[in-house]
Image (spheres, grey):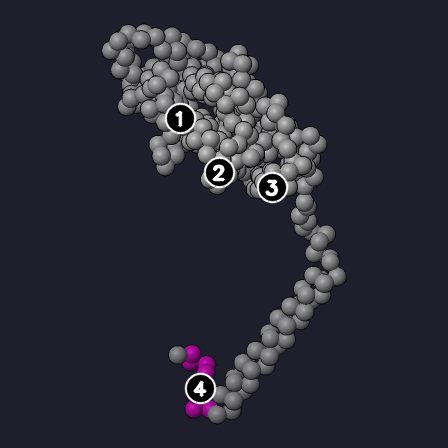
């Protein structure tokens, strides 16, 4: 108890109560005035100078993989508009993806060209994984989100020691092969992209059941119905970032990986010691080669593996 507050003195008690009452009234008046000021600012529009949200113009003659997106159809227009808005106004994620693409697109783009797959499909990898080696709830892995059965069917090595779904070059080539076969079956790259998400058999069944010929005429589940529009939206945002409000200083982009490749045909008992031979940390070795899943490489068969190592340039960026 406060020794300065004498509860036996009625005058002090009454004075203290009056003080509390006056303080409460003053604070209430201040809060009410602040609220009125805020309402006044909102009504006269002064807040709009600090924060603005704009609708977006539809890209002129939009296309995906060289195929026209028929935005003259009202439903198609709204679905594409939704993905443009959602991916534009998730600003932090958009900036991260644009910066990350500068790091990995230089690896993916020449493979797509070599494999005869349109360059727009690099945005499919972006939509699938955000260019991160993630695992889906269904067990799909890597940049291209490849299921184990599909990976093995197309010749990838997948086990506890090595998982080539995490190998960016090999998984990109697998995705290209899948997409080419899907294009041959369906006749359009748009349906090929949809089948990458939902499976070829599902798309074939729905085309037959709905007597449709185009992705844009199909009634599909939520994820697949948004899929191609999301990829196309990313394409237009990434091709014109300033137009969509993304302004990134050139020095803030992530640099492409610089590495040499060494070929090994024997087991490596300790990858940390192997990394030291090339003046790199174990962590950096795994960043360069995420398909190496354990602390060693078993390799009983004498298979030839290509492992990325330092070029001599420091991986850590000190300054630009």
Q: Which mark is residue 6?
A: 4
Main SS of residues in magenta: loop
Q: In percent of the image, x 39 and y 13: which residue is there? A: 307
In the rendering, at what x and y percent does residue 71 appear?
65, 36
User: Residues under labels 2 and 4: Cα distance?
Assistant: 78 Å
**47 left or right of 82?**
right
Residue lying furthest right in this view? 44
In the rendering, at what x and y percent does residue 179 appear?
48, 21
Q: How many neighbours does mark 1 have within 10 angstroms: few (below 14), some (14-19), or many (20 or more)?
A: many
The mark nearer the N terminus, 4 or 3, is: 4
Q: How many neighbours does mark 2 have within 10 angstroms: few (below 14), some (14-19), or many (20 or more)?
A: some
Q: Which mark is residue 220?
A: 2
Q: Tally the numbered discs.
A: 4
Q: State if disc 3 and disc 1 touch (CB < 8 Å).
A: no
- Which residue is labeled 1 in the image? 146
Secondary structure under the numbered disc 4 in the rendered image? loop
The mark nearer the N terminus, 4 or 1, is: 4
Residue 134 in view, yes or no: yes
User: Residues under labels 1 and 2: Cα distance?
Assistant: 21 Å
- Image vertical order of residue 83 relative to residue 265, above or below: below
Q: In percent of the image, x 53 and y 21: which residue is there? A: 187
Q: In percent of the image, x 49 and y 88: which residue is there? A: 13
Front residue of 283 and 96:
96
In the rendering, at what x and y percent does residue 178 appear?
44, 20
- Image vertical order of residue 197 relative to residue 112, above or below: below
The mark nearer the N terminus, 2 or 4, is: 4
Q: Which mark is residue 280?
A: none
User: Residues under labels 4 and 1: Cα distance?
Assistant: 77 Å
| Front: mark 4 or 3 | 3
Secondary structure under the numbered disc 3 in the rendered image? helix
- Which residue is labeled 3 in the image? 75
In the rendering, at what x and y percent does residue 193 appear?
50, 27
């Amino acid at each position: 108890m406060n020794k300065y507050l004498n509860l036996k003195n009625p005058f002090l008690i009454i004075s203290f109560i009056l003080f509390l009452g006056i303080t409460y009234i003053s604070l209430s008046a201040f809060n009410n005035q602040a609220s009125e000021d805020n309402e006044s600012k909102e009504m006269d529009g002064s807040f709009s100078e600090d924060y603005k949200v704009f609708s977006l113009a539809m890209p002129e003659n939009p296309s995906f993989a060289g195929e026209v997106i028929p935005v003259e159809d009202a439903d198609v227009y709204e679905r594409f508009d939704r993905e443009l808005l959602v991916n534009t106004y998730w600003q932090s994620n958009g900036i991260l993806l644009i910066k990350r693409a500068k790091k990995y697109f230089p690896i993916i783009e020449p493979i797509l060209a070599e494999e005869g797959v349109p360059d727009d499909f690099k945005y499919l990898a972006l939509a699938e994984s955000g260019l991160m080696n993630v695992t889906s709830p269904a067990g799909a892995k890597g940049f291209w989100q490849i299921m184990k059965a599909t990976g093995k069917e197309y010749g990838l090595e997948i086990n506890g020691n090595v998982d080539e779904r995490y190998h960016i070059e090999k998984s990109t080539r697998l995705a290209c092969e899948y997409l080419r076969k899907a294009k041959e079956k369906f006749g359009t790259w748009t349906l090929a992209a949809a089948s990458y998400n939902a499976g070829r058999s599902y798309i074939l069944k729905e085309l037959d059941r709905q007597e449709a010929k185009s992705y844009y005429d199909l009634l599909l589940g939520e994820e697949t119905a948004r899929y191609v529009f999301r990829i196309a939206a990313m394409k237009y945002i990434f091709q014109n970032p300033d137009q969509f409000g993304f302004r990134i200083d050139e020095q803030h982009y992530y640099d492409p990986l610089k590495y040499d490749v060494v070929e090994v045909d024997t087991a490596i008992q300790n990858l940390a010691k192997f990394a030291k031979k090339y003046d790199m940390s174990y962590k950096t070795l795994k960043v360069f080669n995420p398909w190496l899943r354990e602390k060693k490489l078993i390799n009983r068969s004498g298979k030839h593996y290509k492992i990325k190592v330092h070029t001599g340039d420091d991986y850590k960026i000190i300054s630009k």
